Amino acid sequence: MSDSSPQNPIKGMAIMAACMVVLPMMDAIAKYMATFETMSPGQVTFYRFFFQFLALLPIAFFVPGAIRGGKRPWMNLLRGALHAAASLMFFMAVKYMPLADVFAIYFVEPFMLTMMSALFLGEKVGWRRWLAIAIGFGGAMIVIQPSYEIFGWTALLPVLCAFLYTLYLFLNRAIGDADSPLTMQFVAGVGGTLFMTAGLFAGHFIYPVEFEASLPSSGLGLVLLIILGSLSGYVHLLVVRAFRMAPLSLLAPFQYFEIISATVLGYLLFADFPTASKWLGIAIIVASGLFIIWRERARVKQISAEPPLG
């Protein structure tokens, strides 16, 4: 299986849009398992990566290097651990909070990524983007404020999730194209499963309510967990393929489709709907994020248009 994809921006945008609509289904399943099947977020996170590993195993078995971990197995295992930690924070949050609220707060991630790129990679960030970052965090505070009064520290879990996922994205950049997307996802599934195995053991003594080990209590629960892991593995493979068909600046805005999908699912499945103040915060976050993406796209175009030195 080749991981190279020809440039096809229209197809890349279509794949990305479809993936962003589907991905919140994973979090809806996690919320359902926590609220209706009374399964701990730690256990749900374990199954998410375990079934991702099982879903990709048949394909990975026939791809050279996938089973052996590729060229950078330890970094891919670390990717899986970071992704598992981020997923755990997210699943703990959706257990108590509306899906749309969690997604809105989580979308401080692009602001964190821009900040860390400036601070640690030396990328130039102008005053307009710094202002957009500040405004975006302000929008997040509008969403967090009432949620914090109701849910306490749980309202800050999406922020921690965003930070961990930012580290995960930095590691993706470090690995680059050294391994195929299939190898990266397969080994990440192994890493996430190992991390959550240790997490369940340690969490049982530290915070048993959120880390209680259990089997699915119904056939429906087992089916949903298999769907959760399978969606995780295959949809993220499609996301990687989309980014190889179209530039980041073109696809990044489609990430905000997740808020729309999460709002619809939250309303249909759990009767949750954002209040007017939360819609204001969501609008500010999305507008600030889109502005940062637009400025980054303009910067890349400007750099590419400059004549080479010499």
Image: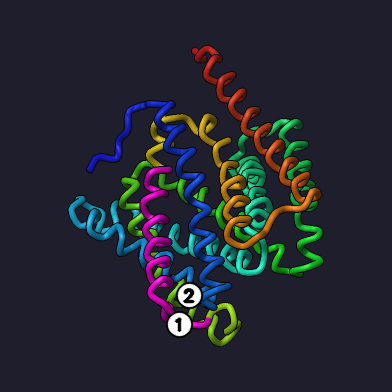
Q: Which of 307 and 267 is in front in this view?
A: 267
Q: Distance between the residues labelled 2 and 1?
A: 7 Å
Query: Which is nearer the eye, 160 or 125?
Result: 160
SS under mark 2: helix
Residue placed under numbered mark 1 in the picture: 214
Residue 157's image quarter? bottom right
**Is 22 left, or right, of 244 in this rendering?**
right
Q: Are marks 2 and 1 in contact (CB under 8 Å)?
A: yes
Main SS category, magenta section: helix
- Residue 103 in the image: state x and y as whole percent: 63, 53
Q: What residue type is labelled 2?
A: Gln
Q: Nearer the viewer, residue 16 or 188?
A: 16
| Residue 281 spot, x, y in % from top left | 76, 46
Secondary structure found at label 1: loop
**Residue segment shown in magenta:** 212-239
- Quarter the N terminus occupies: top left
**Depth check, front residue: 224 or 287:** 224
Label 2: which residue?
43
Q: Residue at x 63, y 41 (%)?
A: 114
Q: In this view, does 289 lie above or below 88?
A: above
